[in-house]
Image (spheres, rainbow, N blue to C red):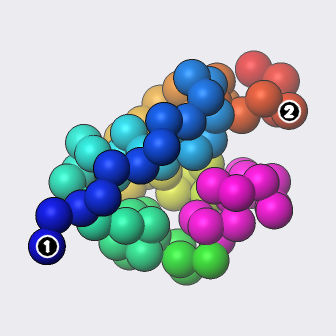
């Protein structure tokens, strides 16, 4: 079954980072992304929807497991100083 396209997220948001990762890694959903980053699915979902702030541990796991520079991750987080 083909994946439904997601609504475009604002240019510099955490949701846009997660969407880009899903496309780049050819993953189906946030749960698959969570497995590749080695975190729980609710942690990704809550960060995407702004219910929780992104934790330092999640930033480090994105960096370590996917090779994304920390500066790139932080640039997608509006409330965190670069």
Residue at x 61%, y 28% (from the top left corner): 10
The quadrant in which residue 21 appears is: top left
Residue at x 30%, y 58% (from the top left corner): 4
Chain part drawn in magenta: 43-57
Q: Which quarter of the figure is the N terminus placed in?
A: bottom left
Q: Secondary structure at mark 1?
A: loop
Above or below for 15 versus 71: below
Q: Secondary structure at mark 2?
A: loop
The quadrant in which residue 2 appears is: bottom left
Above or below for 59 versus 51: above
Q: Is 28 contained in the magenta span? A: no
| Residue position marked by numbered label 2 in the rendering | 79
Residue at x 83%, y 24% (from the top left corner): 81
Side of 46 relative to 52 (left or right): left
Residue 80 visible within the image: yes
Between marks 2 and 1, how big is the CA–CA gap? Answer: 37 Å
Above or below for 8 versus 33: above
Q: Which quarter of the figure is the C terminus placed in?
A: top right
């Amino acid at each position: 079954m083909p994946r439904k396209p997601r609504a475009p997220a604002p240019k510099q948001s955490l949701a846009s980072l997660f969407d880009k990762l899903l496309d780049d890694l050819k993953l189906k959903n946030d749960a698959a992304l969570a497995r590749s980053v080695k975190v729980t699915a609710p942690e990704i979902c809550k960060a995407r929807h702004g219910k929780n702030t992104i934790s330092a541990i999640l930033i480090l796991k994105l960096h370590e497991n996917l090779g994304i520079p920390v500066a790139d991750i932080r640039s997608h987080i509006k409330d965190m100083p670069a």
